[in-house]
Amino acid sequence: MNMGNHIIDLFSYDKYIVSFSGGKDSTATFLYLLDHGVPTDRIELWHQEIDGREKTFFDWEITPDYCRRFAEAFVVAIYFQWKEGGFYRELMRENSFTAPNCFELPGGGIDRTGGQRGKLSTRCKFPQCSPDLKVRWCSSYLKIDVCSSAIINQQRFRGIRTLVLSGERGEESAARAKYNIFEPDRADLRNGRQFTGMSIDSVLSGIGKNNKCGTL
């Protein structure tokens, strides 16, 4: 797998997590894995429900069920993650901790982590159109952090190599075109003190600004 300055052995991983929104970029990323012979029993589709499960506020109501039905059609596992209260609770947060993260487990269980300590703070601002994740918090708090938390807090990812794939298009903005194509994921703890052996890499597909067909 040629990633510009990186040559990646696609088959050197034990598990493949596709950040799946149901859109064309994440769908193409998943189909790329199938086209190149990655077994479906090693692939998982992960969808972050940005509204949580209390009520619909920002996302399309049909999105979660569409993602489930897509996974059923391809006979591939799908797991959902979310922040309690979702977008609305984080938007309206005032002098409080950010809400806990929740994630589905193999076998049907749900785990919950975080939200109990840290710095009390106030949000009360809509996310900004900026490459800075501190102010474009919808991506960082409702998707990226939720996904990373779900990986770190599952024993099944320790001692194996995992590749997290996200479909991105550099044509959408100059800032997005500058994203790293391949790097250790923020959940990577292969050299950490607490969870030695959790090796997580992250790759972005179709990131090249002038790449008409996309790469992975």
Image: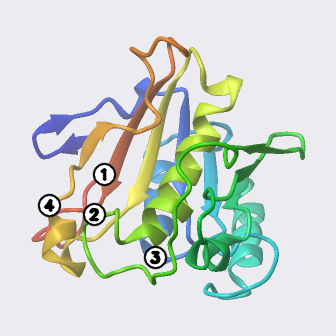
4 or 2: tag closer to the N-terminus: 4
Q: Nearer the viewer, mark 4 or mark 3?
A: 4
- Mark 4 secondary-structure assignment: loop
Q: Name the residue under label 4.
A: 178
From the top left corner, tell me how far across and down residue 191 is, in percent.
39, 14
1 or 2: tag closer to the N-terminus: 2
- Mark 1 secondary-structure assignment: loop
Q: Disc 4 residue type?
A: Lys
From the top left corner, tell me how far across and down residue 169 is, in percent.
27, 71
Q: Which of marks 4 and 2 is in front?
A: 4
Q: Distance between the residues labelled 4 and 3?
A: 21 Å
Q: Name the residue under label 2.
A: 206
Q: Disc 1 residue type?
A: Leu
Q: Which residue shows up at 46% across the image and 76% down it?
A: 24
Q: Which residue shows up at 56% across the image and 70% down it?
A: 21
Q: Residue 27 carries which label?
A: none
4 or 1: tag closer to the N-terminus: 4
1 or 3: tag closer to the N-terminus: 3
Q: Mark 1 points at which residue?
A: 216
